[in-house]
Amino acid sequence: MELYPGRFLAVFCCLYIAAHDVGHGDGYLMPRPFHPSHPFQLVLGPIIWAVWFVTLYATLSVTCNVAPPAVDRGALTWLNGALLILTVLVTVALAGAARWCWRASRQSANQERFFSRVAAGIYLLMAVSTLLGGLPIVLLPPCP
């Protein structure tokens, strides 16, 4: 029996019996982490959203302290434009990941279908949250 890292961890964490039937038969206990049916997909959407959120407001705070754009321009500033582009890119990426997981769920077995569909829903929720969180970028001046 070959001990690759996944099996080594499973054996020594007493998970081998529970995880034995979870694999694809290709020597892995579970699908690879960036497969649409891997449980990691359930947390990747919120992680991407959190990184976007922190980046958005950190950039906004630092730029307003270092080089604030003109207040008289309102919401039409270079800073809001850059943050809007970032928001649109993250939203498109999250929506694309939702579509990818949903399409993969049609070709998967029961447990994998569950993870894929729940991940698709979480990605879609994070995409909507990104759009709603980016709404102040369009409406408000960056540095009042």
Image (tube, rainbow, N blue to C red):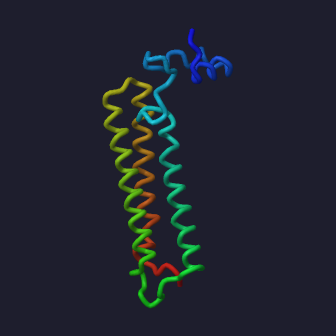
Query: Could you say which quadrant of the image residue 50 lies in?
Result: bottom right
Question: Which residue shows up at 37% across the image and 45% down it?
Answer: 98
- Residue found 45% across the figure and 46% down from its top: 122
Q: In front here: 45 or 58?
A: 58
Residue 144: image location, x then y, percent:
53, 84
Q: Residue 54: image x %, image y %?
A: 56, 61
Residue positioned most to the bottom: 72
Q: Quadrant of residue 25?
A: top left
* Tally of numbered discs: 0
Q: Residue furthest top?
A: 1
On screen, 73 above or below 102? Answer: below
Question: From the viewer's perspective, is residue 123 above or below residue 51?
Answer: above
Q: Please say if 126 is above or below 32.
A: below
Q: Whole-percent x and y of residue 88?
A: 37, 61
**Above or below, comparing residue 67 to residue 93 in the picture:** below
**On-image quarter of the N terminus:** top right
Left or right: residue 110 compared with residue 3 = left
- Nearer to me, 124 or 47: 47
Q: Position of residue 41 (x, y in %)?
A: 47, 39
Q: Residue at x 49, y 21 (%)?
A: 28
At 43% from the left edge and 19% from the top edge, which residue is drawn? 24
Q: Nearer the viewer, residue 112 or 67?
A: 67
